[in-house]
C-alpha cells in the first residue's frame, strides 16, 4: 500500500533497445561514445514521460561510466529507473546491458545518473506532484543510493551556477573550438535543445582533441559533472570548446564548455570527458608524456586529479564487471550495480 500520489520505483522501470550498426562505430571499431550518451538520454526520457506524462529537461548528468566495449552488431538494452524526486526534479539511474550475438553473452557495458527538471510552458521549473517509494529491498537501496548521490551533486551544481559568467576562459595548448546553430531537428517537442543531440556533439569534438593528442584511436571511458546553467533554444549559436586538461598512463581528461556565441559570459554547460588510447590490438596503450607549463595548465591539471579521485569509489564498485558476462533475465527489474 502506497501513500496517496506515490509510485513504486519498480513501476518507473523502462527498457529501450538499440542495435549497433557500422555507422555507429568509432575509428577503433567500437560503439562511438556519442551514440551511447544520446541513447542514455533517450532511455531516461522514456522512463520519465511514462511516469509523469510530460517532457522534462536535463539539468545535470554525472558518473557516466563505460564499463565494457560494445562491438558492431551488438544489441543494447537500456534499463532506467526513477530513483529520487524533489519538488520539480526527477533523478534517473540507467544501466545498459549489451548482448553479443556472436558469443551469445550478456555484459554490463555502461551506467549513468542524471537529474531532470519538470518545466512549465515558459521553460521554468514546475512542481510535478510525484512521490516515490520502494516496496522491495532493491527499490529501497536504489532510493537511498540516488538520494545520497543527489545531495552530493547539489554542491557541484551550486558552485557551477554561482561562478557562471565570472570565470575566465582558459587557453590550453591542446584545444579545439567549433560553432553550431541549434535547429528544430535538435529538439524534441519544445524549442529547447534535446540533451541527447548536444551530448553527441560534445563527444565528437572532445574525441577529436583526444585523438589528436593520442595520435591513435580513442574510446570514451566516462563523462562527469555536466551542469546545465541556462536553457539552449532553437536559433541559439553555440560556441563549443574542448581542451585537454590532464593525462594519466593510458587515459586523458577533456574539458568541454558550451557558451553562447553572442554572449560569451553565458556558460550553458561544462563537462568532463575521459578517453582511453586504443592500439591496433584493441587494448589500452600508453600515452606520450604531457607536462603542464602555464599557470592555467597547472590549475587544470590539479583539478582533473581531484575529479578522478572523486570517481574512485564508484569505479572500484563497478570495475569487477569489466570483461565479465552476466546472467540476464528479462523478467528481472532490479539493477545489477546497486
Image (cartoon, helix red, strand yellow):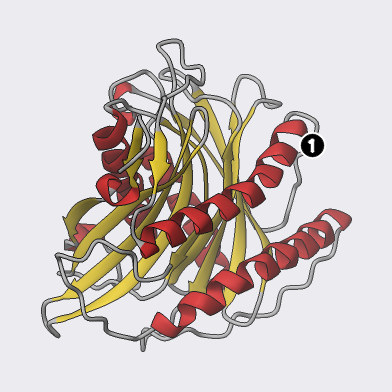
Mark 1 crowd level (few <14, some 14–19, many ≥20, 10 Å Cα): few
Q: Residue furthest right?
A: 295
Q: Quadrant of the N terminus?
A: top left
* Residue identified by numbered label 1: 167
Residue 304 seen in this snapshot: yes
Residue 11, placed above or below residue 216? above
x and y percent of residue 225 in the render? 60, 50
Q: Residue furthest bottom?
A: 281
Residue 188, placed above or below residue 308? above
Residue at (83, 62) in percent of width and height: 298
Q: Nearer the viewer, residue 290 or 158?
A: 158
Residue 241 seen in this snapshot: no
Residue at (54, 74) in percent of width and height: 315
| 20 on left or right of 301 | left
x and y percent of residue 223 in the render? 52, 57
x and y percent of residue 308 in the render? 66, 68
| 196 on left or right of 50 | right
Q: Residue furthest front?
A: 1
Number of residue marks? 1
Q: Nearer the viewer, residue 244 or 133?
A: 133
Residue at (32, 40) in percent of width and height: 7
x and y percent of residue 199 in the render? 43, 45
Determine the secondary structure under disc 1: loop
Q: Nearer the viewer, residue 49 or 179?
A: 49
Q: Quadrant of the C terminus?
A: bottom left
| 18 on left or right of 144 | left
Residue at (46, 65) in percent of width and height: 65
Amino acid at each position: 500500500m502506497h501513500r496517496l500520489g506515490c509510485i513504486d520505483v519498480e513501476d518507473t522501470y523502462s527498457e529501450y533497445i538499440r542495435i549497433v550498426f557500422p555507422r555507429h562505430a568509432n575509428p577503433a571499431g567500437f560503439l562511438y561514445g556519442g551514440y551511447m550518451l544520446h541513447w542514455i538520454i533517450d532511455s531516461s526520457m522514456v522512463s520519465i514521460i511514462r511516469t509523469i506524462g510530460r517532457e522534462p529537461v536535463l539539468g545535470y548528468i554525472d558518473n557516466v561510466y563505460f564499463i565494457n566495449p560494445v562491438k558492431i552488431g551488438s544489441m543494447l538494452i537500456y534499463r532506467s529507473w526513477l530513483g529520487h524526486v524533489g519538488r520539480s526534479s526527477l533523478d534517473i539511474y540507467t544501466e545498459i546491458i549489451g548482448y553479443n550475438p556472436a558469443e551469445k553473452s550478456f555484459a554490463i557495458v555502461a551506467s549513468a545518473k542524471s537529474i531532470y527538471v519538470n518545466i512549465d510552458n515558459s521553460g521554468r521549473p514546475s512542481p510535478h506532484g510525484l512521490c516515490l517509494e520502494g516496496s522491495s529491498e532493491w527499490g529501497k537501496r536504489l532510493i537511498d543510493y540516488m538520494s545520497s548521490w543527489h545531495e552530493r551533486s547539489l554542491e557541484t551544481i551550486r558552485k557551477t551556477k554561482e561562478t557562471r559568467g565570472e570565470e575566465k576562459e582558459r587557453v590550453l595548448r591542446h584545444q579545439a573550438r567549433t560553432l553550431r546553430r541549434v535547429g528544430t531537428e535538435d529538439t524534441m517537442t519544445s524549442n529547447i535543445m534535446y540533451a541527447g543531440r548536444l551530448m553527441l556533439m560534445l563527444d565528437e569534438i572532445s574525441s577529436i582533441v583526444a585523438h589528436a593528442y593520442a595520435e591513435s584511436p580513442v574510446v570514451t571511458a566516462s563523462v562527469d559533472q555536466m551542469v546545465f546553467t541556462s536553457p539552449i533554444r532553437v536559433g541559439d549559436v553555440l560556441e563549443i570548446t574542448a581542451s585537454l586538461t590532464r593525462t594519466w598512463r593510458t587515459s586523458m581528461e577533456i574539458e568541454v564548455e558550451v557558451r553562447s556565441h553572442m554572449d560569451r559570459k553565458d556558460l550553458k554547460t561544462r563537462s568532463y570527458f575521459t578517453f582511453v588510447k586504443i592500439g591496433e590490438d584493441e587494448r589500452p596503450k600508453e600515452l606520450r608524456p604531457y607536462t603542464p607549463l602555464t599557470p592555467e595548465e597547472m590549475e587544470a591539471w590539479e583539478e582533473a586529479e581531484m575529479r578522478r579521485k572523486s570517481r574512485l569509489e564508484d569505479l572500484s564498485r563497478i570495475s569487477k564487471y569489466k570483461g565479465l558476462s552476466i546472467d540476464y533475465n528479462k523478467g528481472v527489474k532490479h539493477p545489477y550495480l546497486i
